[in-house]
């Protein structure tokens, strides 16, 4: 008895410092390049871009999500299985997971989160999933109408936010707008304060199922101006600065004490010719679109903007994605571009109207691109828009002229083609019936090799018809200061931002 | 009487102060030369600019001015982030500043003088209405009002001129009205009234020529203000839209390179703006003294 | 006295009304206001709903009345981007602008007044010429130019001060100087001419005749009276500073209402733009009224004048 008590005392004494060490402390501050939008607090509204996941990884959690080393790491789900006929996917939920407000996570929340999802590819998901069954409080079954090999790609990756779970009772109580003001999730951090346009502060949620986060407070400071971000990093006001390009990136490299931490993710930017479907527009002629492709010096842009750390793109599908087809590259050949334009009837070029782009990439890449186009006589003007507004108007097909667009959404070639090149896709202004036909073929194809062949054919068609002018797969260049012991950049493959948040560490001394 | 003498002594001191600021015979040679050169540059931009101001060669970006290490004679004043020649952009930018500045000043001046004359001479409810509107609009700082209008109608070169005119006519109206009020009491006007001249004739033949001086002086002073406002609008991104080069826009672009030490992208366009404004202000000061010392209150 | 105050109050009210009418009309008349006031990229259904909600089919004056009613309630609309009432957004940023303007004003007075006095006292001598150059430069150099040059020297080359952002006193120095520079020149000029006038006045001459030392004459008699017009102008300029700080706040990324206006135009968040302009104008009208009344209290000649 006495020895037992002694052992207990010794063990607790030993555990005490460990317990104390587990208490979160310190603050990590980011200078973020985009203004944090409240829509990004809600997984139901992910718009097919990767930006919202910066916050989703912090405040929420998903059944399955990419983590270091495994693109489909079971998180809120312990495991899942597929039925033999491929029609039912069953997830076994982790027990004792609590939301920030104390509510326990159950299958009800999973079903609710799926049904309220209205972001990118929502209609596709809803069309394919016949019903969601609650087998018991910790088991959920998704029943499909027909076998769909891409179900996990759409449901269980950041291609959509449908698997990110929100508390049903809470959302029903406060409503969607209330939820955006005071979000509650199952992630490692909870919202403390949000000053729109200025900063977002999060605090560690110690009952996070996976582990207690080591950093107590996360601050996301909105600094849209690149030089201000770098200045803040240099002075130690922030620990990590996102998106530093060009001359400032070189300055960053030269500064002692700061590190340049590039991340890559499945992101391509390309020019979308919305007017190619209009017979009256110069863009209707394939030669004009080809000319645009030859006019751009992709390697030059790579050097100038990304210090050579990015990768020129000739396919709008990122090279890291499954079912990627390697195209013959478009050479940088301004003379050929001019010749093509002359052939098409525009020997002196033509007035190409506006190229509309989103602020960050439109600014960094769109500007040099427009410069190259002008050099061959395609006289275009660049117009930049704020990110959320750009994608919204783009999705509503309100934007005209040429668009400089990009997508960092994960998935595979099929998901990309679905969103950008098939009738009904969220950002599709037009396409060819052959592509539609081929796409539905591959959707039902269970043999991976056959599927790959079809998907390759689609990409080939897109390439031959010059539907787009792919430009580059950007590198996301970030600056890291001395205090960020573990900054999380590059830990999760194909994800540009710091994560997983619960693993980050800051030097408190 | 002694007070009168004292005030005129103070006034004389002020005048003396101004004269000492200018050349020996008072003629502001330097400002006028600068403005003339800028005007010529604006007119002959095509002939003067060595390169296309709107298209650059990316490989030649961030070249410093020719006299610094790394510079070349091809790009005398260096290049910007897209490899565009800074000198050419400055030259074409002069055109924007000159044209927009002069047009806006002319527009504001015409509108403001006309309304000032009407208000001062006709009096009554016309005066009340115009003055109340002037007061209300003067409450809004020019830049804020201009930004608002640019947000509403959308920026284009034409719109900017109209916007600047709409914002700044009030400055004229106030001053001209004051002048007209005192002119009304003068003998030659009274004679014209007695001689049954119509109101419009009087305003046109007698009042207008006499307020022309003030209008001109005010014009040169407003030119500086208008140019700064236009540069501010361009800097904020609601001025003359790119890729047309405007000095304010060059400043905005150049700011990105500031931290990397690319000083010429901000210092050069900023100096141009300052030179133009300084010259306009000096010219205005001199004109104010030359044409009518009574205009001290301007 | 009361009639004077009432008359000034009346004029201010008229100014406010005219301002609101101007802003209202410009939005309604130049194109489709529903498109401006609704979120960029909203669906047609949303635009139509807003059209009905704003009553855009009603006669113009009815719309105006509704507009004014909502303003008086404090409802300046909702920011598309931040999804919060614009009024709250404005109030949260206002203290930052006030802080900046206060520091800029302090700078402009600390530099402008002594220089002006010295220039007046040493008329036509060396110091006066220096003052003249300073005034000319101050009035000719746009605030953002001053700011950029300062960043170049004090941040990039010397590394003494942070180039942008807010949070510490060091962040405040450059924006305050950039903003206050122009006003320092203006205050200097006014102090100088005001001082000159006072120095030439009767009772100063009397003081001199009495044999009082020059320094005492300046300090006791001239100084106080010369300052009155300067401080009046300073009061008005403070509010003007708050509103024209747009460019300085943008250059230095200072989170005030000027930056808010810039965000409004960049994000095409029109309710923000409209509200900032309305509130800015209202602020200036209010301050003008207060200054006029105070002036009348101090100087009886004015109340019985025009």
Image (cartoon, rainbow, N blue to C red):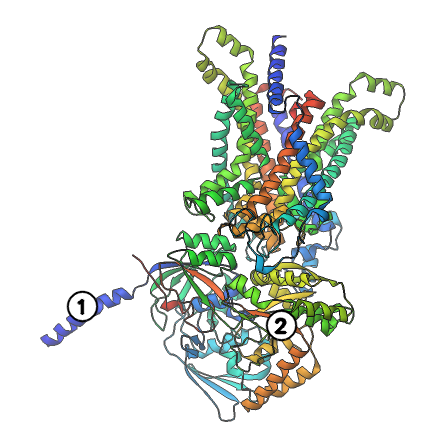
User: Is residue C292 shown to the viewer in this render?
Assistant: yes
| Quarter location, residue A314 | bottom right
Residue A166 left/right relative to A314:
left
Q: Which residue is at a point 67% across and 85% down the rendered structure image?
A: A437
Query: Is C29 or C126 nearer to us in this picture?
Result: C126
* Marks 1 and 2, how far apart at CA: 69 Å
- Above or below for B204 versus A276: above
Residue farthest toward the bottom in the current orientation of the protein? A84
Chain letter for mark 1: A
Residue farthest toward the top in the current orientation of the protein? C210
User: Is residue A174 shown to the viewer in this render?
Assistant: no
The residue that label 1 is drawn on is A13
Query: Is A436 or C234 nearer to us in this picture?
Result: A436
Image position, residue C177 (x, y; %) = 49, 38
Residue farthest toward the left in the current orientation of the protein? A2
Q: Is the residue marked by circle 1 packed among few (<14), some (14-19), or many (20+) residues within 10 Å?
A: few
Question: Which quadrant: the C terminus of chain C?
Answer: top right
- Above or below for B67 versus A164: above
| Quarter location, residue A106 | bottom left
Query: Is A351 or B182 nearer to us in this picture?
Result: A351
Chain letter for mark 2: A
Question: Which quadrant: the N terminus of chain C?
Answer: top right
The residue that label 2 is drawn on is A331
Residue A494 left/right relative to A445:
left
Image position, residue A370 (x, y; %) = 64, 62
Image position, residue A283 (x, y; %) = 73, 69
Q: Which residue is at a point 53% across and 22% down the rendered structure image?
A: C128
């Amino acid at each position: 008895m006495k020895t037992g008590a002694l052992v207990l005392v010794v063990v607790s004494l030993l555990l005490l410092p460990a317990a104390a060490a587990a208490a979160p402390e310190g603050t990590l501050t980011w200078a973020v390049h985009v203004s944090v939008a409240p829509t990004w607090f809600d997984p139901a509204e992910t718009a097919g871009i990767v930006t919202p996941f910066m916050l989703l990884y912090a405040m929420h959690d998903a059944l399955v999500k990419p983590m270091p080393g495994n693109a489909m790491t079971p998180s809120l789900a312990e495991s899942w299985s597929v039925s033999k006929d491929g029609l039912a996917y069953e997830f076994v939920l982790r027990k004792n997971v609590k939301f920030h407000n104390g509510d326990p996570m159950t299958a009800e929340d999973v079903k609710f989160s799926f049904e309220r999802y209205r972001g990118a590819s929502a209609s596709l998901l809803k069309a394919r999933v016949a019903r969601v069954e609650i087998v018991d409080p910790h088991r959920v079954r998704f029943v499909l109408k027909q076998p769909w090999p891409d179900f996990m790609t759409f449901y269980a990756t950041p291609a959509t936010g449908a698997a990110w779970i929100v508390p049903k009772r809470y959302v029903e109580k406060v409503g969607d707008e209330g939820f955006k003001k005071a979000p509650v999730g199952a992630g490692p951090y909870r919202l403390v304060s949000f000053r729109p346009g200025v900063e977002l502060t999060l605090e560690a949620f110690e009952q996070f199922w996976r582990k207690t986060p080591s950093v107590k407070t996360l601050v996301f400071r909105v600094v849209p101006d690149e030089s201000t971000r770098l200045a803040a990093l240099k002075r130690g006001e922030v620990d990590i600065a996102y998106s530093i390009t060009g001359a400032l990136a070189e300055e960053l490299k030269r500064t002692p004490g700061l590190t340049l931490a590039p991340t890559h993710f499945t992101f391509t930017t390309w020019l979308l010719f919305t007017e190619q479907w209009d017979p009256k527009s110069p863009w209707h002629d394939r030669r004009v679109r080809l000319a645009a492709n030859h006019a751009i010096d992709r390697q030059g842009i790579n050097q100038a903007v990304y210090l050579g750390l990015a990768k020129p793109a000739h396919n709008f599908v990122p090279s890291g994605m499954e079912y990627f087809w390697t195209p013959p590259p478009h050479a940088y050949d301004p003379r050929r571009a001019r010749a093509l334009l002359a052939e098409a009837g525009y020997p002196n070029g033509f007035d190409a109207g506006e190229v509309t782009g989103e602020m960050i990439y439109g600014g960094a890449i769109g500007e040099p691109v427009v410069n190259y186009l002008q050099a061959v006589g395609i006289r275009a003007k660049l117009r930049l828009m704020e990110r959320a507004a750009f994608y919204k108007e783009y999705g509503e097909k309100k934007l005209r002229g040429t668009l400089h667009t990009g997508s960092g959404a994960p998935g595979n070639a099929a998901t990309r083609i679905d969103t950008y090149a098939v009738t009904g896709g969220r950002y599709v202004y037009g396409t060819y019936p052959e592509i539609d036909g081929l796409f539905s073929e591959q959707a039902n194809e269970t043999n991976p090799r056959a599927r790959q062949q079809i998907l390759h054919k689609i990409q080939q068609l897109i390439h031959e018809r010059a539907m787009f002018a792919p430009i580059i797969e950007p590198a996301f260049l970030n600056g890291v200061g001395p205090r960020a012991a573990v900054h999380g950049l590059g830990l999760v493959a194909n994800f540009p931002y710091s994560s997983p948040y619960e693993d980050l560490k800051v030097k408190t001394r | 009487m002694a007070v009168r003498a004292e005030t005129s002594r103070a006034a004389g001191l002020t005048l003396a102060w101004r004269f000492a600021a200018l050349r020996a015979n008072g003629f502001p040679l330097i400002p006028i030369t600068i403005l003339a050169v800028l005007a010529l540059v604006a007119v002959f931009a095509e002939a003067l600019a060595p390169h296309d101001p709107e298209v650059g060669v990316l490989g030649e970006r961030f070249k410093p001015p020719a006299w610094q290490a790394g510079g070349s004679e091809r790009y005398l004043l260096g290049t910007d982030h897209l490899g565009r020649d800074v000198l050419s952009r400055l030259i074409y930018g002069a055109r924007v500043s000159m044209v927009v500045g002069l047009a806006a000043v002319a527009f504001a001046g015409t509108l403001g003088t006309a309304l000032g004359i009407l208000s001062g001479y006709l009096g009554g409810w016309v005066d009340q209405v115009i003055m109340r509107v002037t007061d209300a609009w003067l409450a809004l700082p020019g830049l804020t009002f201009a930004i608002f209008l640019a947000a509403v109608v959308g920026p284009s070169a034409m719109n900017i001129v109209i916007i600047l005119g709409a914002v700044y006519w009030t400055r004229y109206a106030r001053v001209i009205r004051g002048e007209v009020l005192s002119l009304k009491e003068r003998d030659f006007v009274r004679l014209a009234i007695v001689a049954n001249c119509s109101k419009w004739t009087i305003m046109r033949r007698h009042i207008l020529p006499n307020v022309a001086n003030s209008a001109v002086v005010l014009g040169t002073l407003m030119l500086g203000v208008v140019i700064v406002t236009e540069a501010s609008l361009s800097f904020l991104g609601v001025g003359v839209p790119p890729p047309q080069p405007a000095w304010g826009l060059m400043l905005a672009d150049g700011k990105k390179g500031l931290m990397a030490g690319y000083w010429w992208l901000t210092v050069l366009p900023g100096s141009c703006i300052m030179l133009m404004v300084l010259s306009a202000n000096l010219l205005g000061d001199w004109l104010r003294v030359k044409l009518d010392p009574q205009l001290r209150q301007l | 006295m009361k009639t004077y105050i009432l008359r000034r109050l009346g004029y201010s009210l008229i100014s406010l009304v005219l301002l609101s009418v101007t802003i209202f009309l410009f939005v309604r008349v130049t194109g489709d206001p529903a498109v401006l006031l609704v979120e960029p990229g909203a669906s047609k259904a949303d635009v139509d709903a807003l059209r009905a909600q704003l009553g855009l089919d009603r006669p113009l004056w009815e719309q105006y009345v509704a507009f004014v009613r909502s303003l008086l309630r404090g409802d300046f609309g909702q920011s598309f981007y931040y999804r919060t009432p614009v009024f709250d957004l404005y109030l949260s940023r206002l203290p930052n602008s006030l802080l900046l303007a206060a520091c800029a004003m302090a700078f402009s007075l600390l530099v402008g007044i002594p220089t002006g006095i010295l220039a007046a006292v040493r008329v036509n001598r060396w110091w006066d010429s220096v003052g003249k150059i300073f005034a000319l430069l101050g009035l000719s150099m746009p605030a953002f130019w001053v700011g950029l040059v300062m960043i170049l020297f004090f941040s990039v080359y010397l590394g003494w001060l942070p180039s942008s952002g807010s949070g510490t006193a060091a962040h405040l120095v450059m924006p305050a100087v950039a903003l206050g520079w122009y006003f320092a020149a203006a205050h200097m000029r006014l102090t100088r001419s005001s001082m000159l006038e006072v120095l030439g006045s009767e009772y100063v001459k009397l003081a001199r005749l009495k044999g009082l030392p020059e320094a005492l004459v300046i300090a006791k008699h001239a100084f106080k009276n010369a300052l009155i017009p300067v401080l009046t102008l300073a009061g008005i300029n403070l509010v003007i500073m708050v509103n024209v700080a747009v460019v300085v706040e943008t250059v230095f990324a200072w989170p005030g209402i000027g930056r808010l206006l810039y965000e409004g135009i960049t994000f095409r968040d029109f309710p923000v733009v409209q509200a900032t302009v309305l509130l800015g104008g209202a602020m200036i009208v209010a301050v003008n009224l207060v200054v006029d009344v105070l002036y009348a209290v101090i100087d009886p000649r004015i109340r019985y004048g025009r």
